[in-house]
Amino acid sequence: MFTHRPGVLLAIASAALFGASTPFAKLLLGGGVSPWLLAGLLYLGSGLGLTLVHLARGALGVPAAEAPLRRADLPWLGLVVLSGGIIGPLLLMLGLATTAASTSALLLNLEGLATMAIAWIVFRENVDRRLLLGAAAILAGAVVLSWQGGPTGLGLGALAIAGACLAWGIDNNLTRKLSAADPVQIALIKGLVAGAVNLTLALALGAQMPPLTATLAAGLVGLLGYGVSLVMFVLALRHLGAARTGAYFSTAPFIGAGLAIAMFGEPITMQLLAASALMIVGVVLHLMEAHEHPHTHEALDHEHRHVHDAHHQHDHAPGDPPGEPHSHPHRHTPLTHTHPHYPDLHHRHGHGV
């Protein structure tokens, strides 16, 4: 089952890394680090760490199998950084300042809902009843897991947190536009810009830098939980589209809770078991998807990492990289065929009613 769905493994691995970052971030907050400052350090650790990876690839002469970001990608990248790296964290910090923890935990589940709703309504990704039920089960599991006695204190703070989730839902869908490009470049630019902005704002508001060991620890958590996680998320978008990737990524709170049990000795509660059951049902419903129908590929010129499969039967120009996988600008000629598929780079077509 999984061998045909690399995007599923990538999305769940992305969720695992991001979910695992939560209990480690709690440890750092327990040491007195400002939440806003920590957000800046996490993003900056992601950006700096991936910059080192990018430079190391060049120094070692590792062939570039991924398509680089091009000038046409920059407006989308700017919107991704603005919505997901600046507006989202800013609204979250404003909301957390005046909103109860129980309400905040519940409201943060809106990110998955926003991601899926935008993908289905705005970008017209295909959805059927099974996928809707699966997404609802995963989100219900996240709500059950974060429930702490009922929401209280709804007001402007809660509206700000909901706005943050909307910003991240927009971010996730706009990142889909960039998913053909090098995910390391995307993640490192987002990390550097978002980290610098959030760190500067936190320091301007009086936050104090933590000890060097805590700073380095935050950077490492950010590299794995934000940087590598985002790289995997972008690759999953390439295979699955935004809605399905967002659904799998919504399992992150469950993964974080499982790690917290191991790290802090927290009890295994009925709440956790119920959330686990709901999320397992949701993931299974998504894995059971079998979407197949005759479809037509229109002529398309683009650039991305590929091998010569059924969708990539083209000639090469002098100077194109040898070996596979590789990346170079190429043209798809019109093609009509039938096979199981997802809303990936080559299957973002409309559907009949």
Image (tube, rainbow, N blue to C red):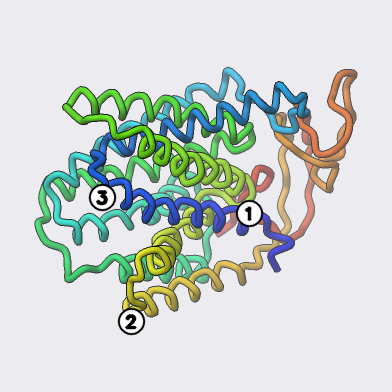
Q: Quadrant of the N terminus?
A: bottom right
Which residue is under mark 1?
7
Which residue is at the front of the view, 282 or 183? 183
- Classify residue 258 by image quadrant: bottom left
Asked whether 117 or 147 is in front, the reply is 147
Give the quarter of the figure containing the C terminus.
Answer: bottom right
Disc assigned to residue 97: none
Inter-mark Cα distance, 1 to 2: 31 Å
Q: Between residues 195 and 126, which one lies in front from this camera angle?
A: 195
**Residue at position x 72%, y 47% in the image:** 296
Q: Identify the residue at horizontal 26%, vertical 37% (top origin).
A: 36
- Residue on which disc 2 sits: 270
Q: Marks 2 and 3, Cα distance to the nearest angstrom?
A: 27 Å
Q: Position of residue 44 (x, y in %)?
A: 42, 30
Instruction: Confirm or deny contact between disc 1 and disc 2 (CB under 8 A).
Output: no
- Closer to the chain start, of discs 2 and 3, is 3
Query: In this image, 45 relative to 331: left or right?
Result: left
Q: Position of residue 245 (x, y in %)?
A: 53, 53
Name the side, left or right, on which 319 lies relative to 348.
right
Q: Which residue is mark 3?
A: 30
